[in-house]
Image: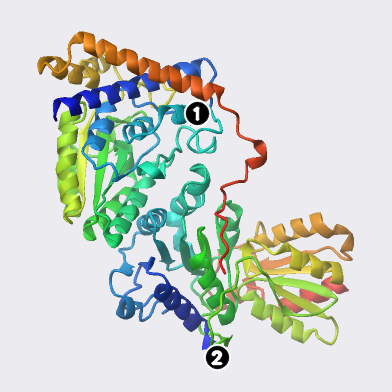
Amino acid sequence: MRNVTYVRALNEAIAEEMERDDDVFLIGEDIADCGGVFGVTAGMLRRFGRRRVWQTPISEAAFTGLAVGAAMAGLRPVCEIMYVDFATTCMDQILNQAAKLRYMSGGQLTVPLVIRTQQGGGTCEAAQHSQNFEAIFAHVPGLKVAMPATPHDAKGLLKAAIRDDNPVIFLEHKLLYETKGEIPREEYVIPLGEADIKREGDQLTLVATSRMVLHALEAADRVAGEVSVEVIDPRTIVPFDLDTVAASVEKTGRLLIVQEAWQSGGFGSEIIRRIVDRCFDSLKAPPRVHGSEDVPMPFSPSLEARVLPNPDSIASAIREIVA
Amino acid sequence: MTPIQLRECYRMMLLIRRFEEAVEELFAQGLIVGTAHFCIGQEASAVGAIAALQPDDMVTSNHRGHGHFLAKGADPRRLMAELFGRSTGYAGGRGGSQHVADFSIGFLGSHGITAGMIPIATGAALTQKLQQTGRIVLAFFGDGATGQGAFHEAVNIGAMWELPVVYLCENNMYAMSTPVEEAFRVPSVAERASAWGIPGVRCDGNDVEAVASAVSDAAKRARAGGGPTLVEAQTYRQCGHSKSDECLYRTDEEEQRWLQRDPLTVAAAKLIERDICTPDALDRLAAQVEREIEEAIQFASESPEPDPETVADGVFADFDVI
C-alpha cells in the first residue's frame, strides 16, 4: 500500500486511463499548463500533449457540449467543471443532452463521458462556490453520480467512471484534495454502485457521503462508549447500493443520513424513502437526515461553521436517535 | 449541379414537402399526437446543404428536423413510425418528432432545446479531427438559436480550434413569433462571423443550388483543416412555428411574396428551363413521392405499439466496468 493524497489518487487514475486508452482526453478550463485549479490534471499536458488536453475559454455550455458530442462520436472525454456551482451554466448539456441522448435515440447513441467537478463548503468561499448539487444530478434519469470520500475510492471510482459507457457526474470535494489515505500499489478499479462499510456497528446505521464520511467516522469514535455505529459510504448515489444499507438497517433498526447538501430535498430524504419502502418494520426509531441548514452559504467563518454538519452535531444526532 | 443531382434534389424536396403535409393532416385526424415543427418552405436549405456533403459526413439538427433527417437518408417509413410512437420508429417510440437519430447514416439527432446541438456538433467535429477521419460535421439551427449563449461559445471554440464543422443557420425570419429585426441589430446572421474570425456567407436559402454551392465551399474549407464557416440560408417558414401556430404576427402580403419564391417552384422551373424534365416527368415524380408517403403511413399505422414493459430500456448502457 501507498499513502497518497486524494488529488494524487485522482491524478493517477486519469493518467493510467489515458495510458490505457487513447480515446480518453481531457477538456476544461485551466487544465493544461496549470494542471487545473486544484491540480488534478497536473502534468497531463507534458505527458500526453495538446491533442489529449484541451484547455478551453470560459465557456462551460460549449465545452461540456463539446464533450457530449465527442463522446457520442466515439471518444471518451473527461470534462472538468471547476466548481459545481458553474455547472448551472451548462445544465442544458448535462440534464437535457448527456442524460437523455441514449434513451431518446432508442439506445443508438452512447455517451461515455465523465464530468468531474468539485463541490462543498468549509473554505469561506460563500454562496456561489460552496454548494452541493448531487441531488439535482441524481434526480435526472440517465446520469450516474459518484462522490468519493477517500483517496482509495477516488482513484478506483474514477477509473471505473472513465470506462463506463454512460455519462458519470464525478463529484469531488474541495476539502478532500489534500487528505491522505492508503491505496494499493497494483492497479484496481471500484465498480460504480457498491457501498463500502467504513466502520462496523450494530445499534445505528449512519450513511454519509463525500467529506461527511470523515466527520461521521469521527462522530462514531466519539460516541463509541455509548452507541455502536455502523458507517456506510454508498460511494455512488446512482447507482445506489440499497442492499448494503438495508441489510445494515435490518441489523441496527436505526438510520441517520449525513449529507453536506441542504437538509431539505436532498438525496438523504430519498435514501429514507427507499429504506421505508424496503424495511419499515425493522425501524426502531424514525430515520433522520442531518444536512446543512437551508440557507445560501454565508461567507463569515462563524456563520459558515453553523451551517455545515460537524462531528459534534453528528454525535448529537446519533444520541437523539438512540435516546 | 448536374442534371441528375438537381432532379434528385427536387425529388427529395418534394418528398419532404409531402411528408410534412401528410403529418399535418395526420395530426388533424388525431393519428399523430404531441407536437411537431414543420419545415414547409425551407426544403432547399436542408436538401442543398446535405447535397454538398459526403455521405459519411455528420449532421446535427434542431426541433424542425424532419427535412434534415430525410435529406440525410432517413427511411420515411421509420420516421413516420416514430411520429406514430411505434416500436419500428427510429427511437422505438421514445423520441418522437423532436428526437430522431440514425447514427448509421451520420444523423446525430434532432432535438428540442434551441442551440443545444451546436456545442455537440462542435464536439463531434473534435472527434473527427482527433481521429483524423476526414469527415466533417454540419450543424443546422435557426435564427432563433443565435440568441443563445451556447451558440456563441461553441462557434468561438470551433473557430479557435479550427474544427471541421459547418454552422448552417436557416434564417426563416422568425424565432417562433419574434422577427429577426427584434432579435439582433446586425442586418444578417452571417455578419456575426467576423466576431469569431471565421468566414460568414449568406445565400438564397430557397435556391437549392445556391445553398449547395455555399455549403460546398464551407465543407471544402472545413475538410482541408481551415476551420468552420457560418453559412446563412435566407429562407421562410411557410407554415406556422408548430402545429398550433396561426401566424398572427405576420402579414398575408409577406407570406404571398415568399410563396412566389417557393423552393419547389424555383427548382421545378430550372428543371424545365434546362430541359432536364418535362412537366409530365415532374408529374410522374410527384406520383412516385405520393406512393412513398402512402407506404410510410401504412407502415407506421400497421406497426406494433412499443411494449410498455420495455419503457426503461435504453436509459443506461449496460456495461461491465471490470
Residue located at (86% from left, 73% from top): A322
10 Å neighbourhood of mark 1: few (<14), some, or many (≥20)?
A: many
In the picture provided, is B48 more to the left or to the right than A323?
Answer: left
Q: Is residue B44 above or below residue A254?
A: above
Mark 1 vs mark 2, foreground winner is: 1
What amino acid is found at the position of numbered circle 1 in the picture? Answer: Ala
Q: Secondary structure at mark 1?
A: helix
Report the amino acid beneath label 2.
Asn
> How many callouts does the rendering have?
2
Q: CA distance from mark 1 to mark 2?
A: 58 Å
Relative horizontal placement of residue A6, taking residue A43 as reference (left or right) = right
> Residue A116, percent across and down?
47, 67
- At x 34%, y 18%, the residue is B289
Residue shown at 19% from the left, 47% from the top? B193
> Which of the chains bears the disc numbered 1?
B
Q: Is residue A122 visible?
A: no
Can you see residue A71? yes
The reply to whether discs 1 and 2 touch (Cβ–Cβ < 8 Å) is no
What's the residue at 84%, 87% (across, down)?
Answer: A225
